[in-house]
């Protein structure tokens, strides 16, 4: 018997049973910072001043945090003198509505729920076309992990396809630089209807931290319509799966008005 066969039999099944049960593979990995402005001093702007992507704005109890611009660098956690911001392991930040990624100091009235796209026909099978629109390749390293033995995306009926003509979902990474705008638009237009789009990573959601530079972009919207927004720098493989399953209506959105629901 070949050694690798024996090693595999001895080790047993490596594939996770998550999201049904069992570990998601992200234990101990830092996620987005948590915000509690009740501890804030009225004139404090320490976190706003240190944020490299302008994800934080305002001051005191009026501070706001746009998770769509957050790269989870933890600089605000280290700079905050009052414990208003603290590190967390919250990573499931995929949402259907971009506004749900914005945390306001004073909770705003609940908006009418956005109607979900009709994805029932794709609940058991989904084909993805990935487009790198200027990414640093951080997101690509996490996407590649989706097909490793632990996550094994195929077990969920989700597959990557080399052609947009066979794709149901366009998975876009990068800030959408000028050179990629036309190819991205062409890929989207080549997809059959109904077609869906996931803005993957903070730079695809908002352009941060690359916007403003000569090679930067401002994110995916309004170039093409977005169905799911997934911030993170980069979003981990479990977050990517969570976003795909939200699109299929197989998992719930866990962030509303910037507030994370465990």
Image: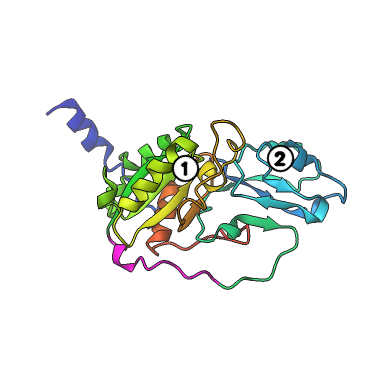
Q: Residue at left 67%, top 56%?
A: 103
View extreme (top): residue: 3
**Is residue 178 placed above or below 191 in the rendered structure?**
above
* Element at label 2: helix
Q: Residue at left 51%, top 40%?
A: 175
Report if residue 155 lies within the magenta region: no
What segment carries the magenta color?
113-124
Work out how far the residue at label 1 is from the one at label 2, CA to CA, in angstroms: 21 Å
Residue under label 1: 236
Splitting the image into 4 quarters, where does residue 196 fall? bottom left
Predominant SS of the magenta segment:
loop
Measuring from the top left, give residue 112's x and y in whole percent: 58, 73
**Is residue 106 placed above or below 76 in the rendered structure?**
below
Along the polypeptide, which appears first: circle 1 or circle 2?
2
Nearest to the observer: residue 163 or residue 62: 163
Nearest to the observer: residue 217 or residue 46: 217
User: Which quadrant of the figure contains the N terminus?
Assistant: top left
Q: Residue at left 74%, top 36%?
A: 50
Binning the other alpha carbons within 10 Å of mark 2 as few (below 14), some (14 to 19) or many (20 upward) gives many
* Element at label 1: loop
């Amino acid at each position: 018997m070949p050694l690798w066969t024996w090693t595999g039999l001895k080790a047993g099944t490596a594939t996770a049973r998550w999201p049904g049960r069992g570990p998601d593979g992200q234990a101990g990995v830092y996620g987005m910072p948590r915000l509690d402005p009740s501890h804030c001093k009225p004139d404090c702007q320490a976190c706003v001043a240190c944020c490299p992507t302008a994800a934080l704005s305002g001051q005191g109890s009026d501070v706001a945090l746009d998770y769509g611009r957050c790269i989870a660098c933890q600089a605000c956690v280290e700079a905050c003198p009052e414990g208003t911001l603290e590190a967390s392991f919250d990573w499931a930040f995929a949402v259907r509505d971009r506004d749900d990624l914005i945390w306001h100091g004073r909770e705003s009235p609940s908006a009418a729920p956005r109607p979900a796209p009709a994805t029932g026909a794709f609940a058991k099978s989904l084909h993805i076309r990935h487009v790198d629109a200027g990414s640093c390749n951080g997101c690509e390293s996490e996407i590649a992990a989706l097909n490793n033995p632990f996550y094994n995306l195929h077990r969920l009926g989700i597959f990557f396809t080399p052609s947009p003509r066979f794709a149901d979902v366009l998975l876009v990474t990068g800030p959408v630089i000028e050179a990629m705008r036309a190819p991205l638009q062409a890929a989207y237009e080549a997809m059959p209807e109904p077609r869906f789009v996931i803005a993957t990573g903070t730079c695809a959601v908002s352009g941060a931290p690359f916007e403003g530079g000569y090679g930067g972009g401002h994110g995916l919207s309004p170039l093409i319509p977005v169905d799911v927004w997934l911030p993170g720098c980069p979003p981990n493989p479990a977050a990517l799966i969570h976003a795909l399953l939200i699109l299929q209506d197989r998992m719930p959105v866990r962030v509303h008005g910037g507030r994370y629901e465990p």
